[in-house]
Amino acid sequence: MTYVIGVDVGTGSARAGLFDHTGVMHGTAQHAIKIAHPQSEWAEQSSTDIWRAVCASVKAVMHETGVEPARVKGISFSATCSLVLLDNAGAPLCLSNGEDLWDIIVWMDHRATAEADEVTQSQSSVLNNLGGRMSPEMQIPKLMWLKRHRPDLWERLGYAGDLADFLTYKCSGSIERSVCTLGCKWTFDPDANAWNTAFLADMGLEDLLAKGQLPDTARPVGTPLGALTDAAAADLGLTTDCEVAVGLIDAHSGALGTLGLHAEDAPEKRMALIAGTSNCHIALSPARNEVPGVWGPYFGAVTPGMWANEGGQSLTGALLDHVIGLFSGDPKAPENSHGALAETLLDRMTSDPDIAGRVHVMPDLLGNRSPFADADMRGAILGLTLEEPRETFLKVYWAAAASIAYGTKLIIDRMNDHGYAINTLHLSGGHKKSELLVGLYADATGCDVVISQAEEPVLLGAAIAALAPLNGELGVSGAISKIRVACDVRTPDPVRAAMHARRYDTFKALYKA
């Protein structure tokens, strides 16, 4: 049997999974990565630290499974849509001082809000693929910020890439980029397979393609890029008989590992919900649907022949962490604090499903990505009264959890008004492990929630990309055809759904106010 490795680099860790050609995962390992916040709403990481974590996780899973390195024939990556910057010599282009080489502007970084607004105000045709508004979480505003505020770094810039593309570059030496990363985060036009160079010039980035080593075209997910270099094979503990394949953004990898397996079965009725620190909502359609406030449509960003639309919530799991921090005064929640809270709340919900009563939470602490596309929006807790503090804490935590589901419903409603008929959610990420959150997603949205029995759907998506070169011209479609994954389904509870419908009406009214 031959194997492939899928690697996923999230915000807090790098994970590696070893898969066979049928999509069965034989082992996984992870290694933590660092993050720095030099200013409010800024976030930076180190490509050196991330590569070290990737190598550690790959070596660990190989050791755990005992598989011979020569039997691993492919590798690919999914990663956060963070921006990696290298200098002319290929060394980290450091943004901040310190022992760590902080050369990555993390996806959640909002330093380029003004530049994002400028792109929106330009009314450029690139906005037709962005729901009408540019987000500061995308790469073009961040690069505009870099050129304007750090001209010293811009002068030395020799490479700019999405994290997933940087990792394939690190492994193979190829500067080719994924249609997923370029189409979704760089204003590259997947329909035309070309850049809008006039737009880049208008934004003062006429030299970006040359300075960032950005190719003229993008490559489909799973395209072979060549074998591991000698250096990369040594770092990873693999061999140069391992093919590197074009990867994708982590959320889109989760969509490929869940929704992608059902892309031929009424895709317009399904949405992938990748839920963890933040939430990403990806739907596929054989037709091009432009949805205000929702990114896309992006052709081929997940599966061949399909357009993808992408909604998102910038803070979800991180919102619940923050609620615990607010009430405890400790920014680091004790281990399993969410699990203990969920058990308490689920027990109460058996007699009273509306835990919070008049307490409501607006969850947009870091702006609203979808459907309002307002980076300046901020969160709120409403309806508090004087009572036992523990009781207030439980109400606020539950209301915050419910608000995450309501935010997802806002996105579903917007997409259903523009070409979709979504009634099924394919859930992956950390939230699928929470009975509380799974129930809220079903009851608050009115959708069936499908949970894949695949242990790590995001890693599976990366593995599908790694398997694509082993399937010749069939590529990703050929890899998918060999994968069979069972699923569990959670249906909405009618009584709780009616309660959430009333709360959802209040939730929407708060935005109007």
Image (cartoon, rainbow, N blue to C red):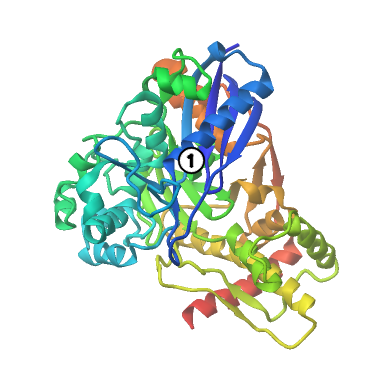
Residue at the spot 58% in from the left edge and 32% down from the top edge: 57
Residue 270 in sight? no
Q: Position of residue 46 (x, y in %)?
A: 44, 45
Task: Give the residue type that dot 1 points to.
Answer: Asp
Location of mark 1 (residue): 49
Residue 53 or residue 388, whichever sits in front: 53
Is 324 left or right of 378, judged from the image as shown?
right
Give the vertical position of 290 relative to 69 (above or below). below
Q: Position of residue 296 (x, y in %)?
A: 36, 50
**Which element carries disc 1, helix, strand or loop?**
helix
Residue 350 or residue 226, whichever sits in front: 226
Within 10 Å of the Cα at label 1, are there few (<14), some (14-19), or many (20+) other Cα atoms?
some
Residue 275 in sight? yes
Is 116 left or right of 437, judged from the image as shown?
left
Residue at the spot 54% in from the left edge and 25% down from the top edge: 5
Quarter location, residue 131: bottom left
Q: Position of residue 472 (x, y in %)?
A: 41, 16
Q: Position of residue 384 (x, y in %)?
A: 68, 84
Residue 49 or residue 373, whichever sits in front: 49
Is 23 left or right of 116, judged from the image as shown?
right
Residue at the spot 35% in from the left edge and 48% down from the top edge: 94
